Image (cartoon, helix red, strand yellow):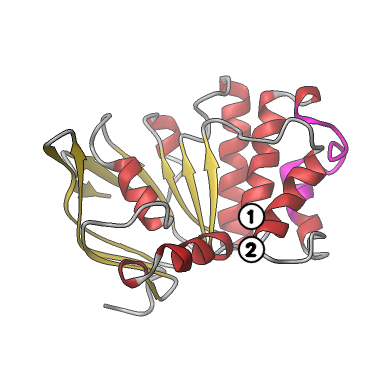
Amino acid sequence: MNNSHIIQVRDLRKTYLVGKVQVPALRGVDLDVEPGEFLSVVGPSGSGKSTLFHIIGGLTPPTSGEVRVAGQDLAAMTDAARTRMRRRTVGFVFQKFNLLPNLTARDNIAVARYIAGYDAKPEASFEEVLRLLGIDGRLDHKPSALSGGEQQRVSIARAVVNHPAILLADEPTGNLDSENSIAVLDILRDLNQRLGQTILMITHNPEAAAYGRSRVEMRDGRIAGRT
């Protein structure tokens, strides 16, 4: 494998056991992602997109194959080692904002620092990210006082506060209207272009997929093409 790639996947396979039936989700996936790339991953439901993300993010182990993330061999890791890697190397943004309702936006972001074992207060450089996200004036509000777009911006801030090597975004605009969807996609593009953040984004929306610099299409647990 080439160490210049931030993500390297070779012959990745994942099979789930449903009752007594083995259901293949990934059927031999090869993928290389360079540092600073913004890659959109598209495909129909059941094509294996989410399974691929869960494995790259260290949320689930593969059945077989090789997976390296920021030089770390995930397939050889214990569950505890994958958890440590996930907390410091990967940021997650989901369709559901998953903010803690009783905490302010500031404290929701600080929780990510605490879980990763860092000082709860972000570095001074994070102020640039907050300005980029447009939430620097909303940090003392709880989620119930924030719009959907603002909540997703807080979730993005939480995902990148620890300066992860990779940001995984799974349908990040799925719960947003068109105006907020464009705003969030613009933010992801700015994070990629201004700060060099490596981003992999799952989306079913062709307009959203166009924000990526490149695109992978998945079908039936395989990569059907890359543009």
Q: Residue flagged by tag 2: what amino acid is it?
A: His
Most common secondary structure along the magenta stretch: loop
CB-based contact (under 8 Å), mark 1 and mark 2: yes
For mark 1, give the secondary structure: helix
From this viewpoint, is residue 191 visible? Answer: yes
Q: Position of residue 135 (x, y in %)?
A: 79, 40
Residue positioned 75% across, 29% down in the render: 143
Quick check: is 139 in the magenta stretch?
yes
Q: Which residue is mark 1?
A: 160
Say whether residue 3 is left or right of residue 132: left
Residue positioned 25% across, 42% down in the render: 217
Q: Nearer the viewer, residue 143 or 166?
A: 143
Q: Can you tell which quarter of the image residue 164 is in? A: bottom right
* Residue count near mark 1 (Cα–Cα under 10 Å), binned few <14, some 14–19, many ≥20: many
* Residue count near mark 2 (Cα–Cα under 10 Å), binned few <14, some 14–19, many ≥20: some
Q: Position of residue 16 (x, y in %)?
A: 21, 43
Residue 163 numbered mark, or none: 2
Quick check: is 186 in the magenta stretch?
no
Say whether residue 156 is left or right of residue 17: right
Residue 109 numbered mark, or none: none
**Residue ranking furthest to the left:** 21
Stretch of the chain drawn in magenta: 129-143
Say whether residue 180 is left or right of residue 225: right
Q: Position of residue 210 (x, y in %)?
A: 41, 39
Q: Nearer the viewer, residue 125 or 179?
A: 125
From this viewpoint, is residue 135 visible? Answer: no
Residue positioned 27% across, 29% down in the render: 45
Q: Position of residue 187 (x, y in %)?
A: 63, 43
| Up/down of 220 relative to 55, above or below | above
Residue positioned 73% across, 23% down in the render: 147
